[in-house]
Amino acid sequence: MTKYNFYAGPAILPKEVMAEASQSAVEFGGTGLSILEMSHRSKEVAAVLEEAKVSVHELLGTSADEYDVLFLQGGASSQFYMTAMNFLGDDESAGYVDTGAWSTKAFKEASKFGNASIIADSKDTNYNYIPKGFDIDGASKYVHLTSNNTIFGTQFQAFPDSNVPFICDMSSDIFSRKLDMSKFGMIYAGAQKNLGPAGVTLAILNKEFAAKTAREVPTMLDYQTHVKKDSAFNTPPVFPIYVSMLTMRWIKKHGGVAAMQAKNEKKAGLLYDEIDRNTLFYGTAAKEDRSMMNVCFLLHDEALMDGFLKACADANCIGVKGHRSVGGFRASMYNAMPEEGVQTLIDVMKEFENVNA
Amino acid sequence: MTKYNFYAGPAILPKEVMAEASQSAVEFGGTGLSILEMSHRSKEVAAVLEEAKVSVHELLGTSADEYDVLFLQGGASSQFYMTAMNFLGDDESAGYVDTGAWSTKAFKEASKFGNASIIADSKDTNYNYIPKGFDIDGASKYVHLTSNNTIFGTQFQAFPDSNVPFICDMSSDIFSRKLDMSKFGMIYAGAQKNLGPAGVTLAILNKEFAAKTAREVPTMLDYQTHVKKDSAFNTPPVFPIYVSMLTMRWIKKHGGVAAMQAKNEKKAGLLYDEIDRNTLFYGTAAKEDRSMMNVCFLLHDEALMDGFLKACADANCIGVKGHRSVGGFRASMYNAMPEEGVQTLIDVMKEFENVNA
């Protein structure tokens, strides 16, 4: 019986990706070895790393002349400080848009370097909307955004107009929709939502933007170390990169980012329509800022909560419990979530209304 | 046909570990989900993280009252600077023993903090021995050692007498032999040799030693962040930790570290005996410092090199080519290498002598 995995992350991956990864954990590509025990310098694994890098360029429509693609370790949490450490000189300033827990952490780490300040936030209403129309100081080195807020279910529908480049945490919506790459000095994303399993972090750096400041930093924390050695200065996390490569291959096979976007818009439309229609539930995020990836909703009658979670579990919809910061429910619907998973959840909501309304 | 994997790292893992990991990549422990798509906060994955931690204590004979066990990202290369950043105050000193490429890098990164100095080295003879009888300044905060030198095939047979605690990089020999833990303030190890696949780094910290200096560091780079959150401050690399946990379970099932040591001594004895007996080959490391893990050897007649590599490949012994810094051949024989793999390599050497002597 298929389980529909609505966890926020680590999160659902395509079934065929997991099947191939499973096979390669025993024997990879006719080598007689498991990919888990193969050298990152072997020609077979080097080809995996290369395909992963090239696939990122293909999916984003970027060229290797303009952008560097890195596979790093330490999660987005490490990018919070590495970005400021590398790019924000002691006398430079950067603006941070605080749209939730992860943005707040990014700002906190950056504030140890240069002059970082929060230029807009939605803290007043528990981050249930995306600030708009805020001023961007043209003298800023960069503005930091979190494109999608996993916890609060909000997402930038359009990125602001700005002459200052964005550094954007896209951990929870990379490859879910088309982007105008010209706005970004850098994008980073922990893999464990739309890209692959936990254990690798993707960084895409505009070469012109990403020249390091004069600050001396440990070798491993200098992006240029990894640029020069093509993400293999030291042993990279081979298997997480491999599974990410398979996931990107799956995205390309299924029509690329544009097709993912169409599918994601359809899934999100179906579920938000049900939330708005169903008399038992209501959404938590401002309608114009609703996330396609993480749908947060509450029951008018909180006493029904355990009953609804049980109904979801009985229908094999798992991971629907909301984050403690918002409560209620959260359905995460990354690229790999099939429409029938969303339809199954909607059917549970309808049936639950029939019984409880 | 079984291939015998003599690669230095990422390296051989037990067949039964890879089989179980492969199964769990499709469906883990009756959850209906792949371990690749499961939340690190789920009770099933939390149990994996807990078993991994407890297994480290069991294998080292340490108690959770005295030692913290962490699973980190970024490889031993990240520990090179994190150790000094966390433990070496601006006015404190530390001694580094330079026994090869990795020690040299550890010293280079540490030299950006406090007063690090090289107190002994074997650079004069291309690191083919382990320095002994060197002085340790009792005022040092710690002395840094690399217990086994993967590239040069040397290994500390016994650790020096010292009142100063050691910080030791055991990436290539952790769990290969019994240790007197009282000598170590901290041990760290990239997983991808004796412990698991690439993508996770083990750190064992003596609680008394590991109090951080006053230096302000990014949250992710403070060991105490990870101690407080039990290695789950942010999303940990779930699958690499899971496979490491399986590998530790395998070690325990096969008699623990003492049994691994007996097996490793036997394998190394067999191969070094053949190198010393065979008229075509000679070892590169000083006999008293020979590594049980990485056996480096050369041909007297270098013209035979390609022929020997071909003979190895024909016998399914792969990864035998030496590192460019030493040349010749290197047979890495971690815990998971069965005795018959070593015997197969020895048979190739004997046959090669019969044909070419």
Image: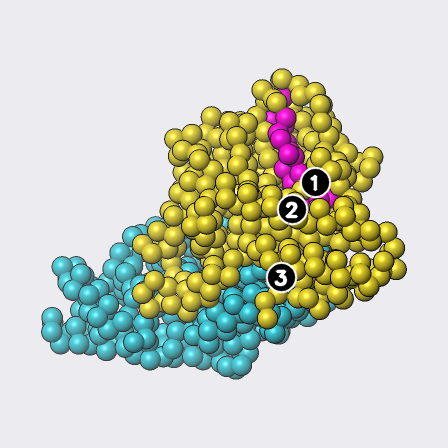
Chain colours: A yellow, B cyan
Is residue B143 shown left or right of residue A321?
left
Relative to the observer, which residue lies in front, B252 or B244? B244
* Residue lying farthest to the top in this orientation: A138
Q: Secondary structure at mark 2?
A: helix
Q: Which of pointers 3 and 1 lies earlier in the amino acid sequence?
A: 3
Relative to the observer, which residue lies in front, A105 or B136? A105
Residue drawn at 38 percent across, 77 percent down: B338
Q: CA distance from mark 3 to mark 1?
A: 22 Å
Q: How packed is label 2: few (under 14 Cα within 10 Å), some, or many (20 or more)?
A: many
Q: How packed is label 3: few (under 14 Cα within 10 Å), some, or many (20 or more)?
A: many
Whether label 2 touches label 1, CB < 8 Å: yes
The residue wearing badge 3 is: A4
Read off the chain for label 1.
Answer: A
* Residue lying farthest to the front in this orientation: A354
Q: Percent position (x, y) of residue A52? A: 42, 48
Q: Amino acid at mark 2?
A: Ala
Residue drawn at 25 percent across, 60 percent down: B328
Q: CA distance from mark 2 to mark 1?
A: 9 Å
The residue wearing badge 2 is: A268
Q: Secondary structure at mark 1?
A: loop
* Position of B54 relative to B169 (above/below): below
Whether label 2 touches label 3, CB < 8 Å: no
Q: Amino acid at mark 3?
A: Tyr
Bounds of the magenta segment: A140-160
Q: Which of pointers 2 and 3 lies earlier in the amino acid sequence?
A: 3
Q: Which of pointers 2 and 1 lies earlier in the amino acid sequence?
A: 2
Q: Percent position (x, y) of residue B28? A: 57, 70
